Structure formats: structure tokens, C-alpha cells
Image (cartoon, helix red, strand yellow):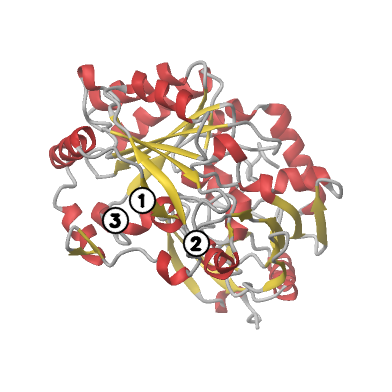
Amino acid sequence: MLPPLPSQLPRRVFDGFGYSTRSVSGFVDAGSVAELQAAFRYAGEHGLTVGLRGSGRSYGDAAMNGGGLVVDARRMKRVLAWDPATGVADLEPGFTIEDMWRTFLREGWWPAVVPGTMFPTIGGIAAMNVHGKNCFKVGPWGDHILEADLVAPDGNVYRTSRTENEELFNAAIGGFGMLGAFSRLRVQLKRVYSGGLRVRGHYCRDLAEQFAWFEEYTQKSDYCVSWVDCIAGGASLGRGQPHSAVYLHEDEDRTPDFDPAHQDLPGHILGVPRALVGTILAKFNTNLGMRLLNFGKNLASRFGPKSEVIQGHVAFNFLLDYVPTFRDAYRPHGFVQYQPFVPKESAQEVFTNILRLTQARGVPSYLGVMKRHRADEFLLSHGLDGYSFALDFPVTPANRAVLWKTLHEVSDMVCEAGGRFYPAKDAVIRPDHFQRAWGQARIARFNALRAMVDPARRLRTDLAARFGLCGPEGA
């Protein structure tokens, strides 16, 4: 029940997942389509803007609406329909990736695309069109959404698909919540024939070897991802450890284990309880400390075993969840994750320049992850035929100004190369970067669709405002 006056709404402080962004908003949680519609009506009656929020796993300000109203739909998490013969499920938006695999793996189905953590809601995942380690082969999450119901601020519920309201479908997926709230998603899961994957670790001496490895292994693998040492320089610039994985074929695993309980991550890492690993990592959370950790990981990667192993789907896919408190190592000021996408023709040059510039400025990334991607059809998609480079930068009062300056210069490089950015992880790009990355024609079409479903411009997030979509330029 919404209170008579906005001043009576519960107010909450929201952090981005990286702890580097924060805002205060009124808060409402919605458990049904009717409650979503009521929240939009209430906002209209009281002149409030509305931001949509799921699990709050976006690193920056994508799920924040400072001074307005935040609507959380995590109570909407039912399975509305399920066909175990085809692997097609109708799900509410509060269903998480963890809910998906725990529910459907026992019948031999796995989410076709997953991010590096199992905790985001599928409504948020659709809004950000999340990708995984297999994007080069199967595309982003949106490629596996068959239908989507969208509750818009105008009060209507739009059924969208590739044959019905197609343009709205292609814009809402990857539209970072600026066209409405998903209330139902029909998704296609992936048939698997084992609870495990065949996984192999590799070693690359520098960035050039990393790119050569991707070009080879994306031709014969289902998943490819690489850790990059972003602190090493000179001849070792961009060295790292890639991993490839393939599904087991039908009848290849004579005792397939689909028990979700057997997928759970271990409680200890090298004998240390997982809950304490973040605290230990905090002791190394300096440029020198990370140099030492990366040196040790490099040695283990270079001289450790390279044999193929069978690894569970959860263990391979959800590396971020091995250390549930990893982000606490960056307290009290947090970190920003920055992920540019660059066409394959110029990616190696751009990534080389990123590593050199951030090292020269004294703000190296503490974690680097490379992935290969393919282009897709969605209006504001970050996807393209090329590579992405996810980077974690600690934020301190001493480095904040130089870090933002450096990342703006990096954004210029990315735009000049015809690249884009990942809104789910962004906290720094400016309106000019947004406009250059996606182009005026795409942005104009997106704004025309917003005018149709949200004529009063009720939907707002701090990220959309920073992109220039909520002021005079986006009106």
C-alpha cells in the first residue's frame, strides 16, 4: 500500500555494487503487475521519477534514482509456465540466475547465457542484455528471450517479441530499464547432457598471444575467457591465463549428475573459508600488493598443470561468487568496473594503449578479463564483432580525479575505434561518449519509443541522466 504523500515513503540509501556511487531515494517493492502499474500512477500523481531495481548488481549507477522513487520487483519470482520437453520457461522478472539453474538443471536444462555471478534478476539481465563467456557463439541474453511483457509508465502492458511490437522488443532488451518494467520473460534454456564441462587452462606470455589464442579457441570451444595481468609491463604486457570449455555430448557422461546440490561452490579456498577471503584480499589491495598477487598467479598459470578437467557449470561460470565478499576489499571508497567493447580489427591496439596509459598514470586495473563477442540486433546493444576488456579500478580520494580523467581519455580511444561500453558496469562515461558510441540515429529512435510508452518522462536513473537521456538532450 502506497502512502498518501511521497514524504511518507520509506527512504533508502542505495550503493552501486562497486560502492563508488551512492544516492538516496524513496522505495517501493512491487509483487505484481497491478502493483507496478500502481507505482507508476503514484509517481505521475505526485510528480516523481521512477527508477527500476532488481538485485542491485550493476557496478555503477544503473539501478539508482537519486531524489526520486526506486521500484524493486524481486517479489515477482514465479515460474509461470515450464515445458521440460523444449526447455522454454515463462518467468517473472525477480527470478534470478541461481533460481534458474537450481530449478531446471535437475531436468537437464541450463541458462543459455549467464554472467559471472548467479545473483542478478532476469528482469535486470534483460534490461542490460547481459553477456557471458560464450557470447562469441550464442550471443547475449536477449538472443534467448522469445517474448517479453513490458509494464510501461503509460499504464499499458505491451507484449513484445520478434513478431509483435518488434521494435519495442529490440529496444527494451538492453534499454537499461528506460522503457518500462519487464513482468514476464519467455526464455529458451540450453539442453545439457552432464552436470560438468570439459575445461582447460592455458597460458599466454603477452597480449598478442591472448588475441591469437582467442582466434584459435573460439573456433572449437563453447566458452572462452581470459584473465589478464594489467600491472605487468614491458615484454609481459597483457600476459594472462585463458580458459576454454566445451559441453559434454549426449552419452559422453555415462553418469550425468544433475543434482543442484552437487553444483554448490566449495566452502573453502586453499583451506580458507570463502567468507574470509575478501578480508585477506584487502591486505593486498594496493598497487604493490596486486603486483605480488598477479606475479604469483602468473607463475601458477605458467608452470601449473594444463590438463583438461571436468568442472561443474556453477564452478566454471560463477567465478565472482567464489569470493562473496570480494568487493569489500575495496572499502571504504569502492571501485569502478569499466568494460569497453572494441571491433576485432582494432581491439589489440586499443587494449594495449589502455594498459600502457593506466600504468603510466599510476592507476592500473587490479583485474582484467577479456572476452570475444558477436554483433546482435538490439537497438542500444553494447555487442559487436570484437572483444571486451572488463577492468576493475580502486577508487580513493587521492586517485579519483586522475582515474576519471584517464578513463575519459580511454573512452575517447574506444569511440575513435568504433567501440561501445557496457552500461551494467559503467560509472564514468559522459553524454558525448554515449552519443558517439551509439550514434544519433539509434538514440533518436530510442527516444521516440520512450515518447510512446513514457510520454511524461517518468522513468529515470542516475545512469540515464549521466548519459544525457533525462535532461534537455534526452527530452
- Whether residues under marks 2 and 3 lie with C-beta atoms below 8 angstroms apart, the answer is no
In this view, the residue in front, 210 or 346, is 210
In this view, the residue in front, 374 or 416, is 374
Nearest-to-viewer mark from 1 and 3: 3
- Whether residues under marks 1 and 2 lie with C-beta atoms below 8 angstroms apart, the answer is no
Which quarter shows the N terminus? bottom right
Determine which of the numbered discs, if any, sits on residue 283 in the image.
Answer: none
- Whether residues under marks 1 and 3 lie with C-beta atoms below 8 angstroms apart, the answer is no
Q: Taking the image as drawn, is residue 26 in sight?
A: yes
**Residue located beneath label 3 in the image:** 326
Q: How many marks?
A: 3
Label whose residue precedes the other's in the sequence (1 or 3): 1
Looking at the rendered structure, the kind of residue marked 1 is: Ser
Q: CA distance from mark 2 to mark 3?
A: 32 Å
In this view, the residue in front, 193 or 400, is 193
Nearest-to-viewer mark from 1 and 2: 2
Q: Quadrant of residue 89?
A: bottom right
Nearest-to-viewer mark from 2 and 3: 2
Residue 396, image x and y in percent? 25, 45
Determine which of the numbered discs, if any, sits on residue 256 in the image.
Answer: 2
Residue 91, image x and y in percent? 68, 66
Query: Along the horizontal axis of the image, is 393 left or right of 193?
Result: left
Residue 108, image x and y in percent? 59, 62
**Residue located beneath label 1 in the image:** 20
Secondary element type, mark 3: helix
